[in-house]
Image (cartoon, grey):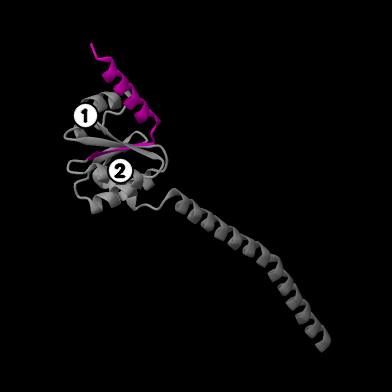
Amino acid sequence: MARPDKAAAVAELTEQFRNSNAAVLTEYRGLTVAQLKTLRRSLGENAQYAVVKNTLTKIAANEAGITTLDDLFNGPTAVAFVTGDPVESAKGLRDFAKDNPNLVIKGGVLDGKALSADEIKKLADLESREVLLSKLAGAFKGKQSQAASLFQALPSKLVRTVDALRAKQAEQGGAE
């Protein structure tokens, strides 16, 4: 029978997996407590970085319906549970790993889909959600301006054509 403290830990981890948009598994072997504190700050406000026990975390992930991470639970493991923008947290992990090669990104899960370490690094290369939304809004605004110009050009072109026809008619009528 499971001990109450382990059952509570599994329940808490299961809840974190269910409430997270993404979870990234890392190996933290060789990092100091100060470096881990810096890493937690670099992940942003919408991520929680927790050192976990592999067996309990594997059980919690399976209870949350995530079975694709089972082979990543070996060695010292820590999980970044992301509740906000996963790009921001992926950038934080990638940048920290560049400065601290002891941090190894093992893989993760994003909205139920398994991600390899390379896919997480590609995710980190994306621009933030706000920047992408700004670009999209700019593109929409640009297209609307083009459409407005096009719709405005049609009547003015029609007026110029009618004026040119009147002038031509006046020339032909005056010449006769």
Q: Position of residue 83 (x, y in %)?
A: 40, 37
Helix, strand or loop for disc 1: helix
Helix, strand or loop for disc 2: helix
Magenta stretch contains residue 17:
yes
Residue appearing at x 68%, y 70% in the figure: 157
Residue appearing at x 81%, y 82% in the figure: 170
Q: Earlier in the sequence, mark 2 or mark 1?
A: 2
Q: Position of residue 15 (x, y in %)?
A: 37, 26
For this view, does 113 lie left or right of residue 74?
A: right
Residue named by callout 1: 54
Magenta stretch bounds? 1-27
Residue appearing at x 72%, y 74% in the figure: 160
Q: Which mark is residue 92?
A: none
Residue 114 visible? The answer is no
Q: Is residue 41 above or below residue 148?
A: above
What's the distance in space between the residues labelled 2 and 1, CA to CA? 21 Å
Q: Position of residue 22 (x, y in %)?
A: 35, 37
Residue named by callout 2: 37
Residue 172 visible? The answer is yes
For this view, does 171 lie left or right of residue 10?
A: right
Q: Position of residue 59 (x, y in %)?
A: 26, 23
Amino acid beneath label 1: Asn
